[in-house]
Amino acid sequence: MLRHAAAGPVLFSVACLALVLAAGGCSASQARLRAMESPDPAQRARAAVAAGQARDTSAAHHLVGLLEDPDAGVRFCAIGALKRIYGDDLGYRYFDPRAAREAAAERWRQARRQGSVHAVAERDEASVHPRGVSGESLGASP
C-alpha cells in the first residue's frame, strides 16, 4: 500500500513535466540562447561551444552577435561554433583588430540575409567546404 501511495506524487510530477515540455517548455536550444546573453563570459563561451556541438542553426543570430563580444575567448568559441555548423569562417579571426572583426561580422550578417551560407551535413564534417555546401540555409532569423 505504501509503495502505491508514493508512486502517485512521482507519476503526477512526471505528468506535469511532460505537459510543460509539450506546451513549449524550455528546450536546450532556448537555454543556450539565454546563456549567450549572460553577463558572464565563461557562460557565453560554453553556450557557443554547445551550440556548435549540437549544430544548432537556430543559434546563428546569437553566434554572429558574439563575434563582436569584448571577450576574446567568447569570440573564439563563437567562430568555432559557426565554422562547425556552416563549414566556413568567412575570413573572421577572433584576434584581429576591432575594425577587421566588425567587417567580418558584417559579412556574416550579410550572408544570413542573403542565405549564402549553408549548414554542413554531419557526414560532410570531415571535409568542411567553403560556401555553397548543401544543407540547411543560414536564413535570417528575428
Image (cartoon, rainbow, N blue to C red):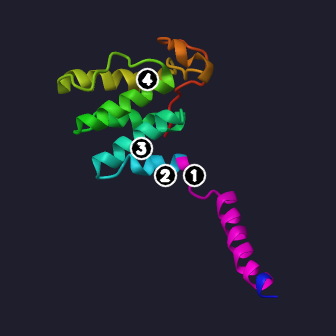
Q: CA distance from mark 4 to mark 2?
A: 21 Å
Q: Which residue is mark 1?
A: 27
Q: Which residue is mark 2?
A: 31
- Between discs 1 and 3, the one toward the N terminus: 1
Which region of the structure is painted magenta? 4-28
Do the numbered discs 4 and 1 sit on residues whose CB atoms are within 8 Å? no
Decide if residue 119 is on the left or right side of residue 97: right
Do the numbered discs 2 and 1 sit on residues whose CB atoms are within 8 Å? yes
Other-residue count near label 4 (Cα within 10 Å), few / some / many at <14 / 14–19 / ≥20? many
Q: Compare residues 29 and 46 and report the one nearer the observer.
A: 46
Name the element at disc 4: helix
Amino acid residing under circle 2: Ala
Q: CA distance from mark 4 to mark 1?
A: 23 Å
Q: CA distance from mark 2 to mark 1?
A: 6 Å
Q: Main secondary structure of the magenta part?
A: helix
Q: CA distance from mark 2 to mark 3?
A: 8 Å
Query: In which image quadrant can residue 92 be found?
Result: top left
Q: CA distance from mark 1 to mark 3?
A: 13 Å
Residue drawn at x 58%, y 16% is 124
List x then y, in percent, for residue 116: 50, 17
Residue drawn at x 50%, y 31% is 140
Amino acid residing under circle 3: Ala
Decide if residue 14 is on the left or right side of residue 45: right
70 lies above or below 126 = below
Q: Which residue is mark 4?
A: 83
Name the element at disc 2: helix
Residue 47: numbered disc: 3
- Between discs 2 and 3, the one toward the N terminus: 2
Do the numbered discs 4 and 3 sit on residues whose CB atoms are within 8 Å? no
